[in-house]
Image (spheres, rainbow, N blue to C red):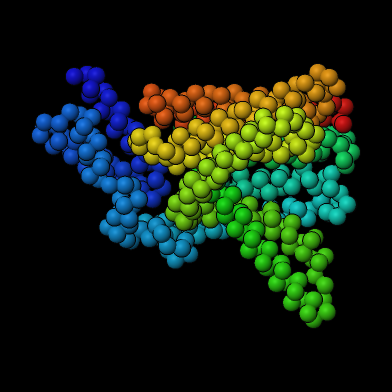
C-alpha cells in the first residue's frame, strides 16, 4: 500500500502546486479545495475505485480552475479581486490600505525612473548626441527603480537588498567605467546584455519573498510575459498621445518635437517600466488568460517559419551570413522561441495529459535546435578562418548556452509527449537553467570590453 499511497500523495502535491499558482486563490482557498478533493477521492475509493482512478475522477468533477476561480469570486465577492485597485481592497480595510501604499510606491518609483533619465544633463550629457552613454545606461535607470518597487512590495530582507545594490553597482561599472567609442562593438554588446543581466536582478527582487522556490521562479517567467504585454500596450497608448500632442500643437503654430524627444518619450519609457509592473501586480487576472492564448497562436506560426527556413537552407545550399545584424537577428529568433517555450510551460496545467500543443512545442524546439546548430557551425568556421571579434565571441557563447538548454528541453519534451517524463521535470529544468543566462550576460557586459581592448 505504501507505493500507491505515495503516488496518490504526489498527485495531490502536484495538484496543490498548480492551485497555488492561481493568484486569485489564496492559501485558505487552496486548503478548502484540497479538503474537498480529498473527501471526493476517499468516497470514490470507498466505492471501489483505485486511488489513481479516484483522483482523476474527483479532479474532473471539480472542473477547471478558471471555473473554480469564478465560483470563489461569487462566494467571496467582498474581496473584489477583479475590481480596479482604486475602488477598494481585496480583503477589507487592511488590503485597501496596502493597495493605496502600492499605488504611492509605484508613483514614487515611476517618477524616480523618469527623473533618472534627465539627471545626467546636470553633468553635461544630452540625449541627442551622447548615445554611447545613454544606450547602455537606459536599462540601468529604469530597472533599478523597478527592482526597488518589487523589493519594497516583497518586503525584501537586508541581505537581498544588499545583493541588489551590488548588482546594480556592477551594472553602473559596466555601463560607464570603460573607455568605449560611440560605435564600438562593446557599446552594442553592453547595450544588449546589460539589460538582460539587470532583468535577472529584477527577478531576484520579485522572488525575494521565497528565494528557493522553483514555483516563484516560474511566477517570474509569467510576470515577465505579462509585464511585456502591459509595457507594449502603454507604449502604443503613448504613441497615440504623442501623435495627438504633435498634431494639435502644430495646428496652433507650436512645434513640440523637442519636448517629445527630450522629455516625454524618454521619461515616459523609463517610468512605464514601473507602471507596467504595478499593473501586473494589481490587475493579475486581466492578462493571465490572454498571454497563454498568444503563445498558442504564435507557437505554430514560429514553428512553421523555422521549418520553412530550414527547407530553404537545404534546397539553396546557401551559407548563413553571420555579420553583426544577422547574428542579432538569429539570436533574437532563438530567444523568442525560448520565451514562447517558457511562457507556455508556466501557463500549462501540470496535470493535463500530453496533447497536440505539446507536439507543436516539440517541433518548435527541434527547429530552434537545428538553426542553433547551423549558426554555431558558421560562427565556429568563421572564427577558425578569420579570428574572433567581440560580436562573434558573444554570439558563440550565447548559442552554446542555448544549445544546451534546447537540446535537453527537446529530450524532456520528447519524454513528455511519449508519457515517460513528468511535466514537473521539464518545468524544474527551465527554472534551474535561468541563472546560466544571467551569468553569461554579466560576463559579456563586464569582461568583454577589457578582454577585447574596448573594441
- Give me the residue at 31% from left, 52% from top: 67
Residue 173 is situated, as x and y percent measured from the top left of the image, at 77, 35
The residue sitting at 71% across, 39% down in the picture is 329
Q: Which residue is located at x 82 percent, y 38 percent?
A: 187
Residue in view at x 66 percent, y 45 percent: 143
Is any part of residue 105 visible from this angle? no
The number of callouts visible is: 0
Residue 161, above or below 138: above
The furthest residue to the left: 47
Q: In the displayed structure, would residue 129 be above or below residue 398?
A: below
Whether residue 52 appears in this view of the structure is yes
User: Closer to the camera, 280 or 398?
Assistant: 398
- Given residues 124 and 349, the one toward you in this image is 349
Among the 4 quarters of the image, the one containing residue 397: top right
Which residue is outermost to the front?
Answer: 315
Dividing the picture into quadrants, the one containing residue 19 is: top left
Looking at the image, the residue that sits furthest to the bottom is 252
Q: Nearer the viewer, residue 258 or 60?
A: 60
Residue 34 lies in quadrant: top left
Q: Nearer the viewer, residue 107 or 344?
A: 344
Return the x and y of residue 344 as percentages of the image width and height: 48, 40
Residue 440 drawn at (x, y percent): 68, 28
The C terminus: image quadrant: top right
Screen quadrant of the N terminus: top left
138 relative to 415 in the view: left or right: right
Q: Position of residue 413 (x, y in %)?
A: 47, 28
Amino acid at each position: 500500500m505504501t507505493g500507491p499511497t505515495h503516488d496518490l500523495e504526489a498527485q495531490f502535491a502536484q495538484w496543490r502546486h498548480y492551485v497555488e499558482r492561481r493568484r486569485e486563490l489564496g492559501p485558505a482557498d487552496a486548503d478548502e479545495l484540497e479538503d474537498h478533493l480529498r473527501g471526493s477521492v476517499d468516497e470514490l475509493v470507498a466505492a471501489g475505485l483505485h486511488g489513481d482512478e479516484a483522483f482523476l475522477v474527483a479532479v474532473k468533477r471539480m472542473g477547471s480552475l478558471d471555473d473554480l476561480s469564478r465560483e470563489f469570486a461569487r462566494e467571496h465577492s467582498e474581496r473584489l479581486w477583479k475590481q480596479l485597485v482604486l475602488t477598494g481592497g481585496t480583503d477589507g480595510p487592511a488590503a485597501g490600505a496596502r493597495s493605496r501604499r502600492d499605488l504611492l510606491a509605484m508613483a514614487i518609483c515611476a517618477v524616480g525612473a523618469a527623473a533618472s533619465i534627465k539627471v545626467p544633463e546636470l553633468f553635461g550629457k544630452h540625449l541627442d548626441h551622447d548615445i554611447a552613454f545613454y544606450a547602455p545606461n537606459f536599462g540601468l535607470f529604469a530597472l533599478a527603480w523597478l527592482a526597488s518597487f518589487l523589493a519594497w512590495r516583497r518586503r525584501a530582507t537586508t541581505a537581498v537588498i544588499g545583493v541588489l545594490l551590488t548588482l546594480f553597482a556592477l551594472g553602473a561599472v559596466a555601463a560607464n567605467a570603460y573607455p568605449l567609442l560611440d560605435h564600438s562593438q562593446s557599446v552594442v554588446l553592453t547595450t544588449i546584455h546589460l539589460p538582460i543581466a539587470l532583468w535577472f536582478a529584477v527577478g531576484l527582487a520579485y522572488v525575494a519573498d521565497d528565494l528557493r522556490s522553483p514555483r516563484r521562479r516560474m511566477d517570474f517567467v509569467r510576470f515577465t510575459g505579462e509585464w511585456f504585454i502591459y509595457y507594449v500596450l502603454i507604449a502604443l497608448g503613448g504613441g497615440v498621445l504623442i501623435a495627438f500632442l504633435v498634431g494639435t500643437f502644430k495646428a496652433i503654430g507650436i512645434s513640440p518635437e523637442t519636448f517629445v524627444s527630450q522629455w516625454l518619450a524618454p521619461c515616459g519609457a523609463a517610468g512605464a517600466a514601473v507602471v507596467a509592473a504595478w499593473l501586473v501586480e494589481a490587475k493579475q487576472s486581466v492578462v493571465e488568460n490572454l498571454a497563454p492564448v498568444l503563445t498558442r497562436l504564435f507557437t505554430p506560426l514560429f514553428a512553421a517559419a523555422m521549418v520553412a527556413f530550414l527547407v530553404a537552407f537545404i534546397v539553396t545550399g546557401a551559407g548563413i551570413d553571420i555579420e553583426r545584424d544577422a547574428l542579432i537577428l538569429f539570436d533574437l529568433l532563438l530567444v523568442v522561441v525560448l520565451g514562447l517555450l517558457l511562457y507556455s510551460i508556466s501557463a500549462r496545467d501540470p496535470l493535463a495529459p500530453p496533447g497536440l500543443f505539446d507536439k507543436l512545442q516539440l517541433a518548435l524546439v527541434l527547429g530552434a535546435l537545428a538553426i542553433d546548430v547551423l549558426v554555431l557551425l558558421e560562427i565556429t568556421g568563421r572564427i577558425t578562418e578569420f579570428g574572433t571579434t567581440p560580436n562573434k565571441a558573444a554570439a558563440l557563447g550565447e548559442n552554446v548556452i542555448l544549445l544546451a538548454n534546447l537540446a535537453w528541453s527537446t529530450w524532456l519534451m520528447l519524454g513528455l509527449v511519449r508519457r515517460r517524463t513528468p511535466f514537473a521535470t521539464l518545468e524544474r529544468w527551465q527554472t534551474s537553467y535561468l541563472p546560466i543566462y544571467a551569468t553569461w550576460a554579466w560576463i559579456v557586459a563586464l569582461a568583454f570590453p577589457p578582454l577585447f581592448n574596448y573594441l
